[in-house]
Image (tube, rainbow, N blue to C red):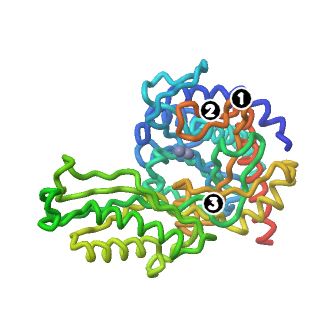
Amino acid sequence: MKISEEVLCLNDELIALRRDFHQHPEIGGKEFRTSQIVEKYLQDLGLETQRMADTGIVATLYGNRPNGKTILLRADMDALFVEEENEVPYKSVNPGVMHACGHDGHTAMLLVAAKVLCARKDEMKGNVKFVFQPNEEVGAAHLMVRDGVLQNPSVDASFGLHLWSPIKSGVIGIKSGSVMAEMYNFKITLVGKDGHTSAPEASIDPIICAANIIQSFQTVQTREISSLKPTNIMFGKIQAGTSSNIIPQKLEMEGSLRYLYDGGENSEENPRKRMERIVKSVCEAHRIDGKIEFEVSNYILINDEKIIDFINSDVVPKMEITHNEIQAYQCLGGEDFSEYSNHNNIPGAFLFIGVGNEEKKTDRPHHSSTFNIDEDCLKIGVELFKNICFAYFDKMEGEEC
Ligand SMILES: [Zn+2]
Ligand SMILES: [Zn+2]
C-alpha cells in the first residue's frame, strides 16, 4: 500500500507520541495527563477543544463548505491494570498500569491525522470531528454521547480504528456487518437452605442447582441457537460455601454472554431470554429461590454496508491496498464504538490494523503483559483516516449534485 509523503514526514513524531503515551499509561477515567497533551496538541493546531465525560476531548475542524457533511473520527486513550513485562526504552513508568491494548497508538494516530487534515483544511469539503474518548475498556462512549458528541455539528458518518495483534502487520481488517460482539455480564444468585451434608434431605442445596444451570446454558449455544450464529456463554466466577461438610445457603456465580448477531431485543429467542427461562425453570425444579441479572457491557458493533462499499471502492484503490492486504475480520471482543455508529443509527465503520509480527514480538494477545505493537503500522492508520475524510467528502458532494 502507498503511504503519502505528508504522512511519512510525520512518522518520527507519530512514534514519539505513541511512546510517550505508552510510557505514561493512565487507567480508564483517569487519563489526566494524556488528555492534557491531546488538548494542547489540538489547540496548537488552531482547533477549539471541548471536554466531555471528564477526560474526553473533542475538537471539530471546519472545512470550506458551510453545509458540508461531518465525519467523526474516534480514538480511545485508556490503559489497563497490567504490569508491563516488555523491556523497552519506553516501558511504563506507572506500576501496574500498561497500554496493553494499543490505545496509545490510537491516540497518536488521530493526533497526527488531525495535523495532516488541519494543514489541508482549505481543500476539505466537510467537517471532521476528532474524538478522544476515555475509558473504552469499561465502555464510556455512552457518556460522550450523553455529553453531546454526536451534535453541533451533527455527525453524518463515524470511523474508528483498532491496532490488532491477531492480524499480521500490514493487513487491514475490513468487513461489513457485525464485527464485534454484543456483550453482557451476568450474575446468578441462588438461595437454598443450609445444613449438614450428611442429611441433604433436610436442606436445599444451591450447588447442584448451579451445576445444572451451567450445563443447561451450554444447550443455548449448541441446541437452541444455530452454530452459524456465534454465541459464547462463559462462567468466570463461582462462590459458595465455607466447609466440605456444610451445605451452603447461598451461591453466587458470574459470567459473560457474547454474540455476533442481532439478538432480537424483546423476542423469546434472545439469548438473555433463553438464559432467564433456564434459570427460572431449573430453580423451580430444585426448589431454589434464584435470579439472573444482566448488565450490558457493549452493544454489537455493526459496520454499515454502504460505508464499507465506499471504503472498498474509494479508499482502498487510492491507497493502492492489494487483495493480500485486506482480511474480512470479526471477533467476539467487545467495543463501545457502536455508540457512535449503529447503536445510534449513524453509518459507520470500525477497521482493524494488523500489527502482529512474530520477529518483532508484536503478535502477543491484547491485554497481556508482553503486548506490543509494530510501530511501522501506525502510519497506515493516519493515511486511512486522511483518505477516508477526503474520499467521503468528494463522494457526498457528488451525490448531492
Ligand atoms: Zn482492550
Ligand atoms: Zn482496545
For the question of whether residue 151 can be seen, the reply is no
- CA neighbours of label 1 inside 10 A, class few (<14), some (14 to 19), many (20+): few
Q: Position of residue 111 (x, y in %)?
A: 63, 38
Q: Position of residue 300 (x, y in %)?
A: 54, 63
Question: Is the CB of mark 3 within 8 Å of ligand 2?
Answer: no
Q: Give me the residue at 27% from left, 60% from top.
A: 207
Q: Are marks 2 and 1 in contact (CB under 8 Å)?
A: yes
Q: In the image, is residue 301 above or below residue 384?
A: below
Instruction: Check the picture and name the quadrant holding the N terminus.
Output: top right
Which residue in the protein does label 2 denote?
Answer: 372
Disc number for residue 345: none
- CA neighbours of label 3 inside 10 A, class few (<14), some (14 to 19), many (20+): many
20 left or right of 289 in image: right
Front label number (3 vs 1): 1
Foreground residue among 22 and 116? 22
Disc number for residue 360: 1
Helix or strand or loop: what does disc 2 sit on? loop
Task: Count up the numbered dots.
Answer: 3
**Type of amino acid at the residue the image marks with label 1:** Lys
Which residue in the protein does label 3 denote?
Answer: 179
Q: Position of residue 88 (x, y in %)?
A: 61, 20
Q: Earlier in the sequence, mark 3 or mark 2?
A: 3
Q: How far apart are the two marked residues, 2 and 1, measured between alpha carbons? A: 9 Å
Instruction: Check the picture and name the quadrant holding the C terminus.
Output: bottom right
List the single residue furthest toward the top. 89
**Type of amino acid at the residue the image marks with label 3:** Val
Q: On the image, which quarter does residue 189 sit in? A: bottom left
